[in-house]
Image (cartoon, rainbow, N blue to C red):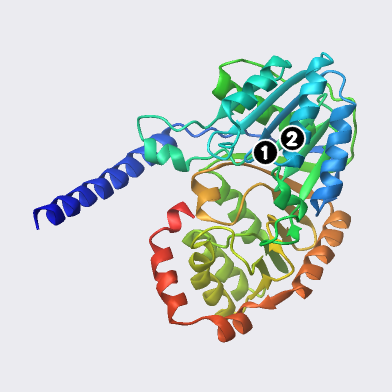
Amino acid sequence: MMIVLIIICALILFIAFILIDFKLGKRNHLKHLRFLDFTRTSGDYQLYTAGDPLFRDMFEDIRYAKQEINMIFFIVKTDPISQELMSLLKQKAEEGVKVRFMLDRIGGFRITPKIIKDLEQSGVEFSFCAKPKFPYLFYRTQRRNHRKITVVDGDTGYVGGFNVGKEYLGKDAELGNWRDYHLRLTGPVVHDLLTTFFDDWYLATKQTTSPKLPTNTTGDKDIEIAATDGGQLEDVFLTLIDEAEEEIFIGTPYFIPSERLFQALLRALKRGVDIKVIAPMKADHLLVKEAGIPYMDRLTRAGGEVYLFDMGFYHAKVIIVDKQLCDIGTANFDRRSLFLNKEVNTLIFNSRFVVDLRLAFLRDVQDSERFNDHADKHFNFGTKIRTGIAYFFRPLL
């Protein structure tokens, strides 16, 4: 009996520590938010929806780098595609190109000291970022740098949802085909992308660096970078929703909006806006699908359409508004991206591009099952229990 009481007391103390740590950590985070205030600029872009062409072109740009390569990913694994990337970075460093390579500390946990030493011996400057530490240890473990940025010679940039690993090439047997969106950017907008990278590099290494000016590439499309730090993204998304007059299309692997954003979606439905959401049929993390079920159910009951992508895993992060503008980046439509993670998104104001993107979105709708149909066939009492449990974990999902 005494042992049981000790275990119960220890559990209560642990939960209390977690709650206090999270509350104080969040308060400290909000006091020190970093928001890089970029304005609309110009550039050009190429969209990738599959990993093979993306990594083919990215690696080709890296091979032809003459001055510097700056790269941050949330996840890089140790499989063949990851090894190819790291071998390429080592090769360029040995050729005299300045290579800075940064990974989120938790997302990059597979990168061992031996791998890092090998990189550094070739001349690669490596750093982890967003390292968990005291105080607020638990909160800091949740505060991830979710950005994926690659900039080559200050002229060509890559940003979007792809990390580096075999599953992003569709080679994971369980997840199957991987649907994601990534952009190759050129023109003045690359300067803002590089500024974002260097801000993270400074926080990780205390090395002060700034982008070279001007970029040697051009572009005439209106683009804006939104680099958020777990505090401003909700306002960015809210503006997109509130300004919509005809339609809002949302693609996200995790549909767990804040109540403020969800109410904005309901208001949009009431003023006649067509809302379509795509989320994955399969879940790649525990409870994320269940956490989204109440919002999917409420949205469909209010007149919105929710689809579950069933041709692999859906990892795209996109918002399309009124066939006029779109948002593509690293941020999911969930609480973690809204309030915890560092993210970087690209707002594109070009109707021709948006119309093509909209068609790609609608093709994915055709490869999806309506949420209501799926719920009627597959949801059961166990689903309700998991959904109830997920409710308490929504701030971390």
Q: Residue at x 82, y 63 (%)?
A: 360
| Amino acid type at image mark 1 | Thr
3D distance between C-alphas at marks 2 and 1: 6 Å
Q: Are marks 2 and 1 in contact (CB under 8 Å)?
A: yes
Q: Nearer the viewer, residue 31 or 284?
A: 284
Q: Identify the residue under disc 1.
A: 78
Q: Identify the residue under disc 2.
A: 83
Q: Nearer the viewer, residue 39 or 33?
A: 33
Q: x, y percentage for residue 159?
A: 74, 41
Secondary element under disc 1, as helix, strand or loop, is loop
Question: Where does the N terminus fall, quadrant-wise?
Answer: bottom left
Q: Specify which label sits upstream in the sequence, 2 or 1.
A: 1
Q: From the viewer's perspective, is 100 left or right of 199?
A: right
| Amino acid type at image mark 2 | Gln
Establish if 364 lies above or below 234: below
Q: x, y percentage for residue 284?
A: 59, 59
Q: Residues within 10 Å of mark 2 (few under 14, many from 20)?
A: some
